[in-house]
Image (spheres, rainbow, N blue to C red):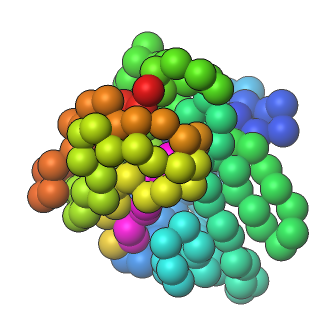
């Protein structure tokens, strides 16, 4: 699978191939493919991962950020990351402090738990849906307080990257 990653003002293409408990990846920048690298990971608890890359271990915390992005905390450093699936890049979430906001699946996977119902009121950080991808469970959290306007996620359903799971108002 191919993704475009935006972080710290840089934008790179990444080719990702699942591999056991992790993945192999290659960064493509300015038309040049970098070497293949490998990373393995294990979800220690919802949103917190133990990552092993090049013999070094990292604790990584991932939480939803504004505008459909992610906050990635690694070794005390916070990065704001956007992950774009080129196949669905025309489908953008409507996000912001107020108004309707769509929470989308970050990658293809299977819905293993739905934690809310339509009409529920949620607070910022509350869990909404849990999606399993590459043997890891990812909890989609409410980026702000609001009311669950629509719930497209169904337990056991397969979802695509970028597919809208929950709409908040």
Q: Position of residue 9 (x, y in %)?
A: 83, 31
> Is 169 included in the stretch rendered in magenta?
no
At 59% from the left and 22% from the top, the residue drawn is 98
58 to the left or right of 37: right
Identify the image quadrant of the N terminus: top left
Residue 14 at least partly seen: no
As displayed, is residue 160 above or below residue 112? above
As displayed, is residue 60 above or below residue 88? below
At 32% from the left and 45% from the top, the residue drawn is 120
Q: Which residue is at the front of the view, 21 or 32? A: 21
Q: Position of residue 64 (x, y in %)?
A: 59, 48
At 55% from the left and 41% from the top, the residue drawn is 145
Q: Which residues are magenta?
A: 136-142
Identify the image quadrant of the C terminus: top left
Residue 9 at least partly seen: yes
Give the main secondary structure of the magenta stretch: strand
Q: Which residue is at the front of the view, 117 or 128? A: 117
As displayed, is residue 139 above or below residue 42? above
Residue, far top: 90
Q: Quadrant of residue 78?
A: bottom right
At 24% from the left and 47% from the top, the residue drawn is 117
């Amino acid at each position: 699978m191919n993704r475009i990653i935006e972080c710290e003002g840089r934008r790179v293409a990444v080719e990702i191939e699942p591999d056991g408990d992790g993945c192999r990846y290659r960064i493509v920048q300015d038309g040049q493919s970098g070497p293949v690298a490998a990373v393995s990971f294990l979800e220690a608890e919802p949103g917190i991962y133990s990552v092993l890359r090049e013999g070094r271990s990292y604790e990584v915390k991932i939480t939803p950020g504004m505008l459909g992005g992610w906050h990635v905390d690694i070794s005390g450093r916070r990065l704001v990351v956007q992950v774009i699936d080129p196949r669905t890049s025309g489908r953008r979430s409507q996000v912001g402090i107020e108004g309707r906001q769509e929470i989308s699946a970050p990658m293809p996977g299977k819905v293993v738990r739905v934690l809310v119902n339509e009409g529920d009121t949620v607070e910022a950080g509350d869990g909404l849906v849990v999606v399993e991808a590459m043997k890891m469970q990812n909890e989609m959290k409410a980026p702000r307080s609001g009311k669950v306007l629509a719930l497209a996620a169904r337990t056991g359903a397969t979802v695509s990257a970028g597919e809208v799971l929950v709409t908040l108002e």
